[in-house]
Image (cartoon, helix red, strand yellow):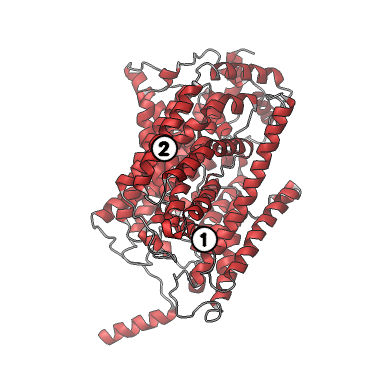
């Protein structure tokens, strides 16, 4: 089948906005197109050399998109810690900006190099690497958990290190690159021999490939238009809400939409465009799990435990005391997170060991792994695609000596530097981490290829407990554990991200060298952009890390208390708190076990313990926003599923991006001392009566 015939079929695939989407003939046509070899579509397009894939325009666009996505990730980090995948948004916006750029140059006759899918992949890789530092950098977890503000909310108020732009940038530069060098030599084994799927990387590659077909470009233009509309709406909605937040607990963010009694236990809709968008992107089970966790904790458990004050804990304690109700909120959430993390760690580790054993015993690396499906009737097309992709993937080698030498050199610099940033983190702690890190990075990258699940935070928690206990309380074990968590998280997180990008590059014919260089540049950008954005938030908003505030940074106190438990044990917990922790730790393992053992048809309705744990500390208000997003998407799918599938992610991304980027002018206004003009507050009948009485007396 020739390229022209293929393109004719692609052009004739029915657009999601057409009225005959449900016609059986259309479905047959889509099925035919699905059977076409992807690489035959691009047969007459020359693949640029790896240097030509790394264009200046790609990195200029990547830089500005990195700033945008870092603001979004930082806001999510400091509010709830829930992080949806932004790969689709990065790929879509990268395509739009460079395509617009090249069109303008083409019209003026100045275009020297056309925009290719390889360049699109470079942009997506760079943006995701850069914005990923905002997560792995721990600005909402281990790094902010070191601060005095968070330490004052815990039982250990002495062991702290306040954030400073200089040491944060230095810390990230010495720990963020090791993961990239640790798995580079294994790229052929993971991608070609084992044929690991890396679902997110594969989905991103299919998206980028589709953009660069005639029909895909047409659809992408419509998706960008939808994203732009909802970006504008979300941005101005954030601006509108800002006018009514002149004081504490003011504005739409604190609107008691379900009544004042429900509001007391944080059940309300806070009109957040961000979390409505997150709800549209996250699977339904995630959103339902978060809501179930909120109902279980704030609707049932905390009111019951509160009624036992004076018996279970002293009645005269402040609401945020770690010896009172706050301890139950934090430590039961930790128990759920650790139970879920331990189960998934052992599950992925066992799958990794079984998969590797199977590969090594049979010595048929390319065909025996269960995740690789070779039973497809499209074997001729697949073999053509695989041959073409493998040929180019292996063309630009990254020498093993370069990867090993880079790892050793950066590890040596890191071992010499980190003890000067954290004197509690001894050089031999770091050496031990770096000896085991490549094996753990491989396990995480392999497990991510099988399940699409990165366990970076779980490996980080493992480092918290081991290094914290090794250091002990008298030698700053809390800070040592948190710093070790940062070292480990950065290594294993960047390793799995790089392998995801290699998979995307493999499927789009992007050079591994170009992918590696793009990841290095993106990581370097992130090491500067992420701390700068955090520093802007930290100086602009005085209530970051304060319980009940908009930017409560819930995982900061969670990670710090994990470190305290690792060092001091459980002796300071209030009555029955440890018993409840054991119960919920066991429940998390049991729920996961049931999910994996029952039929998939029923297992998908069982809540996820990790998601249930999130509202235990901060409340269920954001879960209501997310469920509203789910409801919007559900209704849309019932009305027009193909249109919802095509435009749902674009609409959700617009809502998230618009509200996220509004934090930039909001931060600048706060730094400049400009305050909103109005405080819109909703009072109880009793409070209203007092206000009326006061106004009457003044009159």
The percent position of residue 585, horizontal first and vertical second, equals 63, 59
**Quadrant holding the C terminus:** bottom left
User: Would you identify the image quadrant in which residue 190 lies?
Assistant: top right
- In the image, is residue 345 above or below residue 619? above
Closer to the camera in the image, 27 or 37: 37
User: Most extreme residue toward the bottom, as rendered?
Assistant: 697
Q: Which mark is residue 686?
A: none
Mark 1: secondary structure: helix
Q: Can you see residue 65?
A: no
Q: Can you see residue 631?
A: yes
Q: Residue 130 carries which label?
A: 2
The residue lying at 53 percent from left, 72 percent from top is 574
Please give the residue where the numbered disc 1 appears in the rendered image.
565
User: Would you identify the image quadrant in which residue 57 lies?
Assistant: top left
**Quadrant holding the N terminus:** top right
**How far apart are the alpha carbons under marks 1 and 2?**
32 Å
- In the image, is residue 475 above or below residue 8? below
The residue lying at 45 percent from left, 16 percent from top is 49
**How crowded is the residue under tag 1: few (<14 C-alpha within 10 Å), some, or many (20+)?**
many
Closer to the camera in the image, 406 or 365: 406
């Amino acid at each position: 089948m020739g390229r022209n015939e293929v393109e004719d079929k692609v052009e004739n695939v029915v657009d999601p906005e057409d009225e005959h989407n449900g016609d059986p003939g259309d479905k047959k046509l889509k099925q035919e197109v699905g059977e076409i070899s992807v690489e035959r579509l691009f047969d007459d397009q020359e693949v640029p050399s790896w240097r030509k894939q790394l264009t200046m325009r790609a990195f200029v666009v990547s830089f500005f998109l990195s700033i945008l996505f870092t603001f979004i990730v930082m806001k999510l980090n400091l509010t709830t810690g829930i992080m949806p995948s932004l790969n689709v948004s990065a790929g879509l916006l990268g395509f739009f900006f460079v395509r617009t750029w090249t069109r303008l140059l083409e019209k003026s006759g100045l275009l020297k190099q056309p925009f290719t899918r390889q360049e699109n992949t470079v942009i997506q890789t760079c943006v995701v690497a850069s914005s990923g530092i905002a997560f792995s950098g721990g600005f909402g977890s281990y790094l902010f958990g070191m601060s005095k503000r968070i330490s004052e909310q815990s039982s250990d108020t002495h062991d702290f290190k306040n954030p400073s732009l200089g040491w944060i940038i230095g810390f990230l530069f010495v720990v963020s690159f090791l993961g990239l060098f640790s798995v580079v030599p294994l790229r052929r084994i993971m991608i070609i021999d084992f044929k690991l799927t890396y679902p997110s990387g594969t989905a991103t590659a299919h998206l980028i490939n589709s953009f660069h077909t005639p029909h895909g470009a047409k659809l992408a233009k419509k998706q960008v238009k939808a994203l732009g509309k909802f970006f504008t709406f979300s941005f101005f909605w954030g601006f509108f809400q800002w006018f009514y937040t002149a004081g504490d607990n003011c504005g739409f963010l604190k609107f008691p939409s379900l009544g004042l009694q429900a509001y007391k236990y944080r059940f309300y809709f806070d009109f957040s465009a961000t979390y409505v968008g997150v709800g549209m992107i996250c699977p339904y089970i995630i959103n339902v799990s978060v809501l179930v966790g909120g109902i279980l904790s704030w609707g049932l458990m905390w009111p019951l435990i509160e009624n036992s004050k004076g018996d279970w804990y002293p009645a005269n304690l402040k609401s945020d005391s770690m010896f009172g109700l706050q301890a139950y909120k934090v430590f039961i959430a930790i128990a759920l997170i650790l139970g879920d993390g331990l189960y998934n760690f052992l599950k992925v580790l066992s799958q990794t060991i079984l998969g590797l054993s199977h590969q090594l015993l049979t010595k048929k690396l390319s065909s025996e792994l269960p995740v690789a499906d070779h039973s497809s009737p499209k074997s001729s097309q697949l073999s053509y695609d695989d041959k073409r992709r493998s040929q180019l993937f292996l063309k630009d080698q990254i020498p093993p000596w370069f990867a090993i030498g880079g790892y050793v050199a950066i590890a040596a610099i890191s071992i010499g530097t980190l003890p000067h940033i954290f004197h509690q983190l001894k050089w031999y702690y770091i050496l031990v981490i770096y000896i085991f890190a490549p094996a753990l990075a491989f396990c995480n990258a392999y497990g991510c290829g099988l399940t699409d699940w990165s366990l970076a935070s779980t490996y980080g928690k493992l480092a918290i407990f081991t290094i914290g206990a090794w250091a002990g309380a008298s030698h700053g074990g809390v800070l040592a554990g948190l710093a070790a968590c940062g070292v480990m998280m950065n290594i294993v997180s960047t390793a799995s991200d790089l392998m995801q990008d290699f998979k995307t590059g493999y499927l789009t014919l992007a050079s591994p060298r170009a992918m590696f260089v793009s990841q290095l540049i993106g990581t370097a950008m992130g090491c500067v952009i992420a701390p700068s954005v955090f520093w802007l938030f930290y100086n602009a908003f005085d209530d970051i890390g304060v319980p009940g505030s908009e930017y409560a940074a819930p995982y900061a106190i969670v990670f710090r208390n994990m470190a305290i438990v690792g060092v001091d044990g459980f002796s300071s917990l209030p009555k029955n708190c440890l018993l409840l922790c054991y119960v919920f730790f066991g429940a998390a393992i049991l729920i996961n076990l049931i999910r994996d053992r029952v039929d998939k048809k029923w297992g998908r309705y069982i809540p996820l313990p990790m998601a249930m744990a999130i509202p235990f500390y901060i409340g269920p208000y954001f879960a209501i926003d997310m469920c509203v997003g789910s409801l919007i998407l559900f209704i849309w799918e019932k009305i027009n599923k193909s249109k919802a599938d095509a435009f749902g992610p674009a609409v959700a991304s617009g809502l998230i991006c618009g509200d996220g980027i509004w934090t930039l002018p909001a931060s600048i206004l706060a730094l400049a001392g400009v305050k909103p003009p109005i405080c819109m507050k909703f009072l109880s009948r009793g409070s209203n009566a007092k206000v009326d009485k006061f106004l009457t007396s003044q009159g």
